[in-house]
Amino acid sequence: MLTRQQEALPLQPVVLERDQHGISRRQISENALKVLYRLNKSGFEAYLVGGGVRDLLLGRQPKDFDIATSATPEQVKQLFSNSRLVGRRFRLAHILFGRDIIEVATFRGHHHQVNNSKDMSSQSSQGMLLRDNVYGTIEEDAERRDFSVNALYYNIADFSVVGFSNGLADLEARRLELIGDPETRYREDPVRMIRAVRFAAKLGLTISPRTEAPIRELAPLLSDIPAARLFEETLKLLLAGYGLETYRTLQHYGLFAPLFPEAAEVIGQGDNNYGRFLELALTNTDERIAQDMRVTPAFLYAALLWGPVEIRTQQFMHEGGLSYYDAFMMAMDEVLGRQVKSVAIPRRFSSVVRDIWMLQDRLTRRSGKRPHRLLEHPKFRAGYDFLLLRAELNPQLKELAEWWTEFQLANPVDRQQLSRHAQARHNQFGDESSKPRKRPRRRPRKKKEV
Ligand code: ATP
Ligand code: MG
């Protein structure tokens, strides 16, 4: 454990020489190496930094390789014709190699001199550029990073690894430790709270007591983060292969509710199956990722918000006297409209979320040409997968789900047969869905859950 005094001081860097760590250049992408070498040859300091180094030390394949350098963005731009400068809050150079992009950031410095107002034009005299673009030394750069295990640098000059703030020891101990005073750092950027949960779940790290202590109390600060940024973060949270574990940890720290208020409320009521349904959807997503199968954020959002949509539909029907169809349409609009205030859902995904939801009703209609036509629906597969998931918790849907499985596998003749059976079966049980519908349904349906 660190003493109070040590905590306050920037910890001395620890250097692992090239023969003291397992990172070899073969594990680093060719493009990242090219950039590192060119910077170094041009007289700048150049390091692989952050997640790339951390993951290599853990024996994992990094998602991407980020570079930190003493060169300013303009100097980087001059060195690489295939580069462009991006970012307003913090200027970065992107070096483009076809579809591969290597991100190069200049060492960030402290900006105590900058006035703390949101005045974007603030500028100071020394080495400081517009906005957040204060450049500094590698030590300062390390201090501004979030967790100690992310303050690790691989030096291309001598192939050593430099760890700041006890990062190497923390990584060894599988400990997630925020750099600096946790409360201050979370207030500076509340997204760090969900990053803590993400790294803990993904890398199997334990969040240290001082790093976890303020989270529950500060969790509501997430409501102030722009919804678009949170969309990107939640993708990394829930669609990285550790969704279930991440979700449970978010709930544990009170971080789920500020991200998904309506889902949290419905799940928190505890008298329904929606919490289990979401866990099932996350398990399913994790399994797909483990098998290298495609996953879409739309499916997960559909599952997250299915509870609120069903409950609102019932309320609109019973309190507002609306038909099932109208109530369902209004519920979808309302639930999505509220959700995008906390975590945005880009239109290209929200339209698929709607498709998946609307298919749930259409999948109950199995007579005549309908099921044949439905197979052609561009989102049929996602709608059907969603039905399968619902059927796992709702025995009443089992027969329907199995019927669709069979129907897809059947040849055209057998399909006719199946569709006739479905019709006969429904007539026998008086299921209205088998009758041709001239107008949108006006009759309320029985309350259904999941
Ligand atoms: P991943 O494997 O998910 O990419 P990563 O650690 O590389 O993990 P990134 O989001 O790619 O995470 O960020 C790169 C680096 O930038 C981090 O390792 C960290 O040092 C720093 N960083 C990112 N976000 C923050 C933040 N909100 N506050 C401080 N430092 C941050
Ligand atoms: Mg990264």
Image (spheres, rainbow, N blue to C red):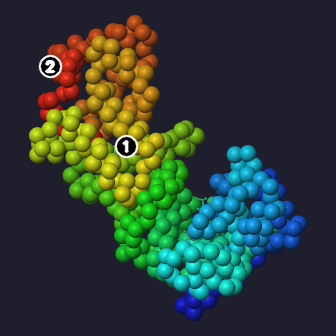
Depicted 364 relative to depicted 347: above or below: above
Give SS at disc 2: loop
**Quarter of the C terminus within the rendering:** top left
Q: Identify which residue, 265 or 78, lies in the foreground.
A: 78
Name, please, the residue furthest toward the right: 41
Specify whether residue 246 is in view.
no
60 left or right of 213?
right
Pointer 1 local density, CA inside 10 Å: few below 14, some 14–19, many at least 20: many
Q: Position of residue 154 (x, y in %)?
A: 76, 68
Which residue is tagged 2? Answer: 430
Residue at 88 percent of width and 66 percent of height: 41
Pointer 2 local density, CA inside 10 Å: few below 14, some 14–19, many at least 20: few
Residue at 50 percent of width and 41 percent of height: 295
Number of labelled discs?
2
Q: Position of residue 175 (x, y in %)?
A: 56, 71
Depicted 263 relative to depicted 44: above or below: above
Depicted 341 relative to depicted 322: above or below: below
Which residue is tagged 1? Answer: 302
Residue at 42 percent of width and 49 percent of height: 345
Residue at 38 percent of width and 9 percent of height: 414
175 left or right of 41?
left
Give SS at disc 1: helix
**Quarter of the N terminus within the rendering:** bottom right
What numbered label is drawn on residue 81? none
